[in-house]
Image: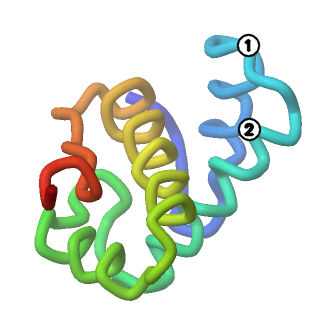
């Protein structure tokens, strides 16, 4: 299991840089987006944030492109880093 804290996602950043071979700017953006989501979700454990909580967060974003960037970060975090189920793209499923 990966070591992480709610607001200290340094291991996730390392995962993005080393394992995923992402550019530093992209990795930092993923980390910051996940931090924003976790702040929104409150005291929930990083790996146990509920799907309804994630949907509530995504509903607060009016811009589809911006929301899609958060969905991409969620996929990297939950699917790739935490080895969890993928999230569907909300802008595609609503059309």
Which residue is rendered at x = 34% and y = 39% of the image? 78
Q: Is residue 62 above or below residue 86?
A: below
Q: Residues within 10 Å of mark 1 (few under 14, many from 20)?
A: few
Using the image, tell me which numbered label, if any, was put on residue 27.
Answer: 2
Rendering coords of residue 88 (x, y %): 20, 43
Q: Residue at x 63, y 15 (%)?
A: 20
Residue 9 on image: x %, y %: 63, 52
What crowding class fits label 2: few (fewer than 14 Cα within 10 Å), some (14-19), or many (20 or more)?
Answer: many
Viewer-side residue, 93 vs 17: 93
Q: Position of residue 86 (x, y in %)?
A: 22, 34
Q: Is residue 2 left or right of residue 41?
A: right
The label on residue 21 is 1
**Which of these two is toward me, 25 or 2?**
25
From the viewer's perspective, tell me whether residue 40 is left or right of residue 78: right
Residue sitting nearer the eye, 62 or 42: 62
Image quadrant in which the N terminus is located: top left
> Is disc 1 placed on a helix, strand or loop?
loop
Q: Position of residue 56 (x, y in %)?
A: 24, 82
Q: Residue at x 29, y 75 (%)?
A: 44
Q: Is residue 26 left or right of residue 37?
A: right
Q: Quadrant of residue 21?
A: top right
> Which element type, helix, strand or loop, lies under badge 2?
helix
Q: How many marks?
A: 2
Q: Quadrant of residue 81?
A: top left
């Amino acid at each position: 299991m990966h070591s992480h804290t709610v607001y200290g996602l340094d291991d996730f950043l390392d995962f993005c840089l080393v394992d995923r071979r992402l550019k530093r700017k992209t990795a930092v953006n993923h980390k910051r987006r996940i931090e924003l989501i976790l702040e929104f979700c409150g005291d929930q454990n990083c790996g146990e944030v509920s799907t309804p909580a994630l949907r509530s967060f995504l509903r607060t974003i009016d811009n589809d492109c911006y929301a899609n960037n958060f969905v991409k970060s969620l996929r990297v975090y939950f699917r790739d880093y935490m080895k969890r189920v993928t999230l569907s793209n909300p802008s595609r499923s609503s059309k």
